[in-house]
Image (cartoon, grey):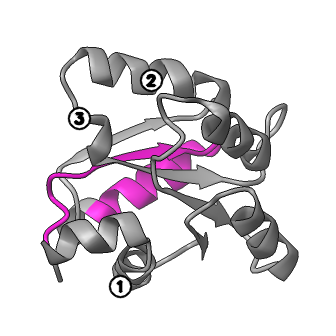
């Protein structure tokens, strides 16, 4: 497995248990060192901004974004992110508790970089990450 330890994994999911399980899985696999999470998708812009102010390189960000959330769903959050001049190029893997093909296609149409069905394994996560061109280029350098 290639080294993604310099990545900052940002997870947005309304389920605290899902965040906790994902963080445990990611840390156990040794995939990334920095894991940051929020349950409210509306907190994403300020979360990213705060990390940049603290000196975290925004090029290290990888976002895991749940689709099914109350108030603001993952698709709306992805649209907002892609409209932001500061954060439009951050890789985003969309997460869903289902494997609905319509969700997968909508994710890609809106500029998502991949799709994972929950729960996912470390191998599934790494395979999805390897297919993101921006990250693939960084891994191969």
Please report whichever mark, 2 or 1, sits nearer to the chain's N-terminal start. 2
Could you classify mark 1 by the number of other residues whose Cα lies within 10 Å: few (under 14), some (14-19), or many (20 or more)?
few
Magenta-colored span? 3-26
- Expressed as whole percent of the image width and height from the top left, the position of residue 114 reads 57, 70
The answer to whether residue 79 is magenta is: no
* Mark identifier at residue 123: 1
Q: Is residue 94 left or right of residue 131?
A: right
| 130, above or below 66, in the image | below
Q: Residue at x 29, y 44 (%)?
A: 59
| 140, above or below 81, in the image | below
* Mark identifier at residue 57: 3
Find out whether the residues at labels 1 and 3 contact each other: C-beta distance under 8 Å. no
Please report whichever mark, 1 or 3, sits nearer to the chain's N-terminal start. 3
Q: Residue at x 43, y 79 (%)?
A: 131
**Position of the N terminus by quadrant:** bottom left
- Expressed as whole percent of the image width and height from the top left, the position of residue 75 reads 77, 49
Residue occupied by mark 2: 47
Depth-wise, is mark 1 or mark 3 nearer the camera? 3
- Expressed as whole percent of the image width and height from the top left, the position of residue 118 reads 60, 71
Q: Residue at x 62, y 60 (%)?
A: 112
Find out whether the residues at labels 3 and 2 contact each other: C-beta distance under 8 Å. no
Q: Is residue 38 left or right of residue 84?
A: left
**Relative depth, front residue between 57 and 127:** 57
CA gap, disc 3 to disc 2? 13 Å
* Mark identifier at residue 65: none
Element under disc 1: helix
The answer to whether residue 13 is magenta is: yes
């Amino acid at each position: 497995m290639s080294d993604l330890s310099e990545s900052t994994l940002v997870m947005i999911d309304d389920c605290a248990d899902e965040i906790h399980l994902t963080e445990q899985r990611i840390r156990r696999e040794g995939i990334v060192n920095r894991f940051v999470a929020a349950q409210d998708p509306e907190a994403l812009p300020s979360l990213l901004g705060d990390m940049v102010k603290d000196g975290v390189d925004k090029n290290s960000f990888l976002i895991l974004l749940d689709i099914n959330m109350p108030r603001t769903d993952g698709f709306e959050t992805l649209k907002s992110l892609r409209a932001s001049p500061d954060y439009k190029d951050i890789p985003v893997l969309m997460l869903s508790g289902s494997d609905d093909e319509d969700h997968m296609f909508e994710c890609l149409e809106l500029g998502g970089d991949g799709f994972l069905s929950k729960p996912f394994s470390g191998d599934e996560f790494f395979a999805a990450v390897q297919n993101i061109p921006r990250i693939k280029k960084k891994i191969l350098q």
